[in-house]
Image (cartoon, coloured by chain):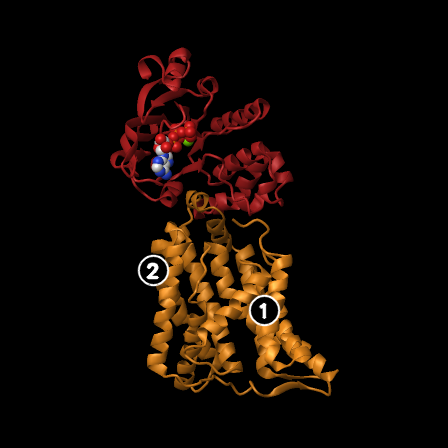
Amino acid sequence: MELLIQSIVTGILLGGLYAIVGLGLSLVFGIMGLTNIAHGNLMIMCSFIVMVFGTVFNGNIILMLVLAIACMVVFGFLFQNFLVNKVIDKGPNPALLVTFGVSIVIQNALQLIFGADARSIKSAFATVNVVSSDYVSISGAYLANFVVAVVVIVLLSLFIKRTRMGRAIRASANNVRAAELMGVNTKLMYSVTMCIAMATACIAGLLVGNTFVFYPYSGPQYLIIAFGVVVIGGMGSIPGTLLGGIILGLAQLLGSYFFGTGYQIFSGYIVMLILLTVCPAGLLSNAKRK
Amino acid sequence: MSEYILRAENLSVSYGDFRAVTNASLKVKEGSITALIGANGAGKSTLLSAIMGEHKPTEGHVFFEDREVTGLKPSVIVRNGIAMAPEGSCIFDEMTVRENLLMGCYQKRAAAKKNELFEKVYSLFPILKEKEKQLSSFLSGGQRQMLAIARAIMADPKMIICDELSLGLAPVVIGEIYEKLTEINKEGVTFLIVDQDVGRSLEYSDYSYVMVKGGMVMEGPSCDLPIEEVKDAYFGINKYA
Ligand SMILES: Nc1ncnc2c1ncn2[C@@H]1O[C@H](COP(=O)(O)OP(=O)(O)OP(=O)(O)O)[C@@H](O)[C@H]1O
Ligand SMILES: [Mg+2]
């Protein structure tokens, strides 16, 4: 019984981490219809950047994160403005290939610079149990993952829904021509979207590095998790990523509880397949996306 | 300043090798309703999109209030004071009616007058106020066109360009839309309109241009233009074939 409760709690908290891993992928897909194959590697690149800043600044987490986000926002802008925006009008495939190319470059560059060893960004609170009772114990890292994910998702939803720029971003996603005719620079809005996605990838990169070890080639593993989250929650839905993350996390931990640890990943994808059969567009997808 | 708010001079526009507009000129008097008439494929929408800066003309010039605006981006054109209600209304169907209108006043200058503009638009089109929280994809065809015009008004423009305003609408609704248009015009907004219906275009406009196969073939005060000859041009018969 205790183990079941522990599995449920851990599953939900892990879901928060998964949600923020998938957030940038979902945002970019929702706004510009682009499947960013590089998302996983970009996130792991963020982990490395945070780690580097961590050694430079003696583990001041806020400073590490702010600087890493600043770097990634610049990177995101250049990536979007000089690569993706050049081909995005030519249909989804050229842009997809661009992200695929970037993905390969990043993975190899990381391996070249950092070697193949396991790394982590363990902060002081990561391994401390913030809750430990007879029924359940919760580590600082897992709790932080969940809280940060919820806060980021809520803030991003509000930004997209309520602000003038958020509206312009949605308008660009909805009808490029009309948005341009209203005076919106739609390409710039795409770049802003990519910058936001990179900022969320940075936060995800920090949390992942604070929770698990990572390697230069961990990216694809997280890309698959991000896909799972986004597919379950609904492509392009921001609140959907939280739901998708939690479902995927729960499915994995409960699968592992009922069938054994070896079934953790497997049961996650079984649940994803079942949900997709029942609800192909994802649970919270915009009902009628093209 | 000349009496013409908009002048397009000898415009040519191509899609790749295909020349959709050839050496077409058009002038719109300030405060007027000017109509652009022509059969399907004559190049009306293309000409309008060149004026709005969506396509760069290969030749020719566009002047707005005597300033050259040829080839400027749509966002700059909008800031200068031209708003467009495009063909097929082109509304944001994943956004609410109110959000659509907010997008209309995206430009800073218009955004500063947001409340005033909302009041104006809602008094012109009370139905939009009633539906302001609804997703605009639930609007009827006529309501969509009203939203498109209202959204253009939200940009606080000096001039509004309407493409295919009445396409697919019932006569009663068309009448209503044209009444509103006249009302807005009386407040000083200049209109350049495209409509499939030759009779109605001539009836509601002060001045008309007729386009055939990418070029202007006829122009004049709408009340003086011989409707039969305009229709010949429109259907591409007799000497206009
Ligand atoms: N994007 C495009 N690419 C290639 N050709 C185009 C494009 N848009 C329009 N054309 C062609 O240019 C010509 C003029 O089209 P345009 O849409 O301007 O006509 P129109 O007068 O607005 O017609 P309608 O009354 O049907 O709206 C047509 O022959 C059309 O096939
Ligand atoms: Mg047209």
- Which badge, 1 or 2, comes first in the chain's sequence? 2
Q: Is residue A258 above or below residue A171?
A: below
Going 33% across and 81% down the picture, which residue do you hit? A113
Q: Position of residue A183 (x, y in %)?
A: 42, 46
Q: Is residue B182 left or right of residue B51?
A: right
Q: Is residue B152 above or below residue B112?
A: above
Q: Is residue B215 left or right of residue B106?
A: left
Instruction: Give the position of the N terminus of chain A as an image quadrant.
Output: bottom right
Q: Which mark is residue A83?
A: 2
**Residue type at mark 2?**
Leu
Residue annotated with mark 1: A269
**Residue type at mark 1?**
Tyr
Along the line of sight, the residue nearer the viewer: A93 or B236: A93
Going by the picture, which residue comes out furthest to the left? Answer: B59
Q: Colour of chain A?
A: orange
Question: Residue B34: which quarter of the image?
Answer: top left
Q: Are marks 1 and 2 in contact (CB under 8 Å)?
A: no
State whether label 2 is within 8 Å of ligand 1. no
Going 36% across and 67% down the picture, which residue do you hit? A102
Which chain gets the red colouring? B
For mark 1, name the chain.
Answer: A
